[in-house]
Amino acid sequence: MTARLTLIAQGATLATRRAAFPADEALFSAPILSPLPAHGALALASPRQAAVQTAQALGLGATIDPLL
């Protein structure tokens, strides 16, 4: 059995655009993304706003994991 791990970075926030340390903030602008196929995939997201918004924009239906 082969497992596949895909890591996705969150979209840009105002702080990351300024090269500053980010707080828990929303994405800088609404992402224009196509949903990813999630053929039986398990999707996890950090509880930070930008990570949750990125997962939603990709249509992942991610479970929030506070340990991320």
Image (tube, rainbow, N blue to C red):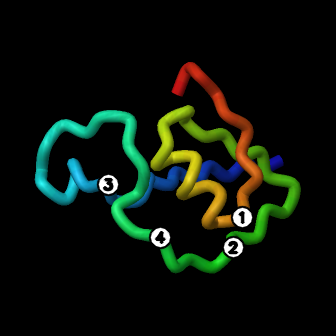
- Quick one: label 2 or label 1, which is nearer the N terminus? 2
Helix or strand or loop: what does disc 4 sit on? loop
Q: Position of residue 26 (x, y in %)?
A: 42, 50
Q: Amino acid at mark 3?
A: Thr
Helix or strand or loop: what does disc 2 sit on? loop
- Quick one: label 3 or label 4, which is nearer the N terminus? 3
Name the mark nearer the viewer: 2 or 4.
Answer: 4
The residue singled out by tag 4 in the image is 30
Q: Is residue 18 above or below residue 30?
A: above
Please tell me the numbered disc located at residue 14: none
Instruction: Give the alpha-carbon distance from disc 2 to disc 1, as whole Å.
Output: 5 Å
Helix or strand or loop: what does disc 1 sit on? loop
Helix or strand or loop: what does disc 3 sit on? loop
Q: Residue at x 46, y 49 (%)?
A: 50
The residue singled out by tag 3 in the image is 13
Q: Amino acid at mark 4?
A: Ala
The residue singled out by tag 1 in the image is 59
Q: Nearer the viewer, residue 25 or 47?
A: 25
The residue singled out by tag 2 in the image is 35
The answer to the question of whether label 3 and label 1 lie on touching residues, with beta carbons closer than 8 A, is no
Q: Amino acid at mark 2?
A: Pro
- Quick one: label 3 or label 2, which is nearer the N terminus? 3
Mark 2, other Cα within 10 Å: few <14 / some 14–19 / many ≥20: few
